[in-house]
Image: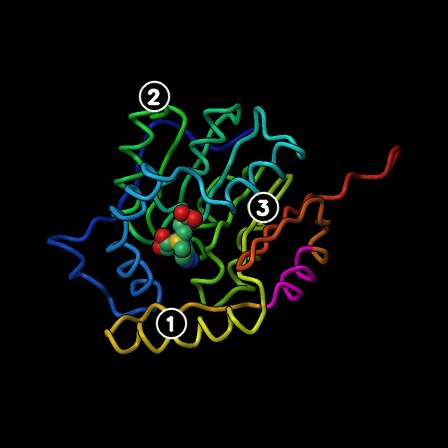
Amino acid sequence: MAGGARGPISTFAMPEGDMAGCCGSTSCGIGRCFGHFSHRYTRRYERRGLEDTQRHLIAGLSAVGFAGRSLLEIGCGVGYLHQYLVLHGAATAVGVDLAWPMLIEARALAARQGLAQRVRYVSGDFQDLAPALDTADITLLDKVVCCYPDAAGLIAATLARTREACALTLPRRHAFNRVAAHLGAGLFCAVGSRYRPFVHDPAMIDRQMRAAGLAPVFEARTRIWLTRIYRRALAPAGG
Ligand SMILES: C[S@@+](CC[C@H](N)C(=O)[O-])C[C@H]1O[C@@H](n2cnc3c(N)ncnc32)[C@H](O)[C@@H]1O
């Protein structure tokens, strides 16, 4: 284990006022959209706990092994997935999100669980921030790739920061999800948001993972979501 949280520092680029400082970019539009839902994410977690996709990720990571590992969660929202993993044995976690209100909730939730010294939060677009962040043993992308237009770029930036394993949840590429994403895009456009949901091709992501030397070691599905964990192939003995 190395890297991870350097200390109880939270790096927020908080605009003045509310989110009126949106620069007009797609990233800013995503952050602004999800910023509006941050309280709802916390309330949902407090009422209902972890989601099925997160239980799948935890089951897969338990099989792979996360004790003592450093975590980097991209699009961490209010943080309960990596906070659960740190509470149950992971060493440290860094959470990155485009929506700073999510990170305010995450920091408060971490403090309530006594995790302030082991987690750190950074606000911004991970693709831009990645070169300045430490690598982590395990990277997590739970329902994040589907919020971002450049899936290949986001995965490449994640892999460049992954030492051991990458765990992700994506929408399954079936007709229902594609129609829902299409309708969702229309709805967000109609309300003036630049956020758009995407159903990127899991096969394309699978090829990208394998090309980078990672192999799938765990898979689970709900009707909507596909959870996969990829792990770096071990170097051949004596090699
Ligand atoms: C659907 S929410 C999921 C949040 C959390 N993973 C969960 O499952 O509760 C997606 C989150 O990813 C963030 N996000 C999307 N693209 C991002 C990027 N390129 N860099 C950082 N955060 C991103 C959004 O701001 C949003 O909070």
The image quarter containing residue 28 is bottom left
The magenta-colored residue range is 201-209
Residue 208 sits inside the magenta stretch:
yes
Question: Could you tell me how far apart the alpha carbons at marks 3 and 1 are, in whole angstroms?
Answer: 25 Å
Q: Which of the pair 217/95 is nearer the observer?
A: 217
Q: Amino acid at mark 3?
A: Ala
For residue 75, which numbered disc appears in the image?
none
Indicate the position of residue 18 as horizontal and vertical percent values: 14, 55
Specify which label sits upstream in the sequence, 2 or 3.
Answer: 2
- The reply, left or right, for residue 217 in relation to residue 193 is right
Magenta segment main secondary structure: helix
**CB of mark 1 near ligand 1 (< 8 Å):** no
Q: Are marks 2 and 3 in contact (CB under 8 Å)?
A: no
> Quick one: label 3, few (<14), some, or many (20+) residues within 10 Å?
many
Quadrant location of the C terminus in the rendered image = top right
The image quarter containing residue 36 is bottom left
Residue drawn where x is 24% and y is 74% of the image: 192
Q: Is residue 128 visible?
A: no
Q: Amino acid at mark 2?
A: Gly
Instruction: Name the residue carrying label 3.
Output: 167
Q: Which of the pair 14/74 is nearer the observer?
A: 74
Question: Could you tell me how far apart the alpha carbons at marks 2 and 3 are, in whole angstroms?
Answer: 25 Å
Q: Amino acid at mark 1?
A: Gly
Instruction: Name the residue carrying label 2.
Output: 114
Q: Which of the pair 221/17 is nearer the observer?
A: 221
Residue drawn where x is 22% and y is 63% of the image: 22
